[in-house]
Image (tube, grey):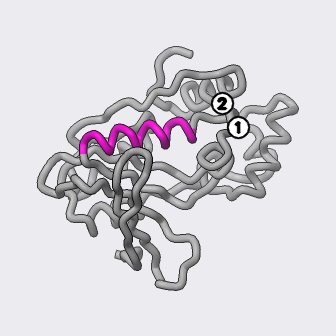
Amino acid sequence: MEFKKQAQASIPTPWGVFNMLAFAKEEGDWMPHLAMVHEDFSADKIVLTRIHSECITGDLFGSRRCDCGEQLATAMELTSQEGGIVLYLRQEGRGIGIINKLKAYNYQDLGMDTIQANHQLGLVTDGRSYQVALDMLTALEVKRIKLLTNNPDKIGIFEDSPIELVERVPLVIRPNDDNINYLRTKQQQMGHLLRDL
């Protein structure tokens, strides 16, 4: 396992008390992946789990261009109710980073969708990897999960893993005028499991 737990601390949040665990290859990594593990977590049960990729614009600043911030808040609420886990992976902008993400936004403002904008910059559609999520869950001794997601790529990582995916739980956020095209692109071109938009 490449990524190891480097530190942890108890974090009181609006959704209850979570233990924040930092996972990285080295202790000095200043941008580790994070696991928010509710205080009622038990590895012996089926664990409600959210794998969430970092979105500075949505998670921190409430951008309406995406549904990420609302998804994160909803995931924190639901996992707090069930003693679950939110895995926060540091792969901003589907793996392209915040600088390229802002550049891509400019292309989107000219009429491109998120995929076209990435390609215009010479970047892949989605550069994320979820192997670290498996490493983190394994370190937490999780055996069975309910996965809070609409993304088929996240579902797929459990097919040949030692962790049993018992159920997919939809995480659907009501669209707004600023993110409806973003959500349609995810649904129609990336296969995300969203209701008709």
Contact, mark 1 vs mark 2 (Cβ under 8 Å)? yes
Which residue lies under the disc numbered 2? 182
Main SS, magenta region, reads helix
Is 71 magenta? The answer is yes
Q: Please say if 51 is above or below 62.
A: below
Q: Residue at x 46, y 75 (%)?
A: 24
Disc 2 is placed on an element classified as helix
Quick check: 134 above or below 49?
below
Q: In the figure, residue 92 lies in which quadrant?
A: bottom right
From what the image shows, is residue 110 above or below residue 48? above
Q: Decide which of tag 1 and tag 2 comes sooner along the chain.
A: 1
**Quadrant containing the N terminus in the rendered view:** bottom left
35 vs 196, left or right, is: left
Residue 97 - label: none
Q: Position of residue 54 (x, y in %)?
A: 57, 53
Which residue, given by chain and number where applicable, does mark 1 sit on?
Answer: 114
Question: Tag 2: residue type?
Answer: Tyr
Quarter of the image for residue 177 reads top right
Q: Which residues are magenta?
A: 68-82
- Magenta-drawn stretch contains 22: no
